[in-house]
Amino acid sequence: MRHIDKIILHCTATFPDSYVTVGVIDKLHRKRGWNNGIGYHYLIYTNGEIHKGRDIDVIGAHVKGHNKTSIGVAYVGGLNDKGVPTDTMTMKQETSWLQLVTSLRTVFGYCTVHGHNEFSSKACPSFNVQDKYKFLNI
């Protein structure tokens, strides 16, 4: 099993009502030349369903320089109706995200929680994870 010390949250940078699935992202990432397909380990749909992406034992492709020791989780959404990066997580997505963090910590031990934007000059996940979920990194 890989050593994991970070769980990194992403968004799909789409409108919340967009049709985005693991299969859609897998195709997009393969077009970018990622032979292992989808770079995220999990994708949380707007209804709160958690879907498996890349196998947890395989290094992700979601944050350059941090993939080796992290788990990548994305939620569908991240843009408001004007296309501006915005926290669009539904209550169901947020509940699933918190449950997933708890489950991953049960398997891998304590892991800090981060947003993609902490490691890159991107808006993703469209909010500050440290502000919103500071209680997770105590």
Image (cartoon, rainbow, N blue to C red):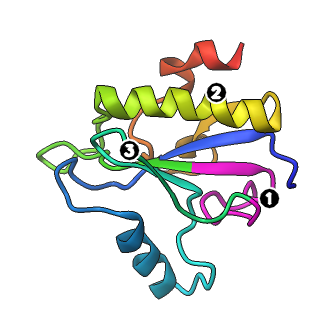
Magenta extent: 57-72
Q: CA distance from mark 1 to mark 3?
A: 26 Å
When the figure is inspected, residue 19 is found, relative to residue 110, above or below; the finding is below
Q: Is residue 70 left or right of residue 72?
A: right
Question: x and y percent of residue 121 in the render?
Answer: 53, 50
- Amino acid type of the residue that numbered disc 1 sits on in the rendered structure: Lys
Q: Residues within 10 Å of mark 2 (few under 14, many from 20)?
A: some
Question: Is 96 in the magenta?
Answer: no
Magenta stretch: includes residue 61: yes
Q: Quadrant of residue 48?
A: top left
Instruction: Please provide percent x and percent y for residue 61.
Output: 63, 66
**Residue labelled with disc 2:** 102
- Residue 108 in picture, x, y percent from top left: 80, 38
Give the structural element (helix, strand or loop) at label 1. Answer: loop
Residue beneath the point at 28% across and 41% down: 47
Mark 2 is on which residue type?
Thr
Taking the spot 60% from the left edge, 40% from the top edge, the residue there is 118
Residue identified by numbered label 1: 68
**Figure check: 45 above or below 86:** below
The C terminus: image quadrant: top right
Image quadrant in which you'd find residue 33: bottom right
Assign the N terminus to one quadrant of the image: bottom right
Q: Residues within 10 Å of mark 3 (few under 14, many from 20)?
A: some
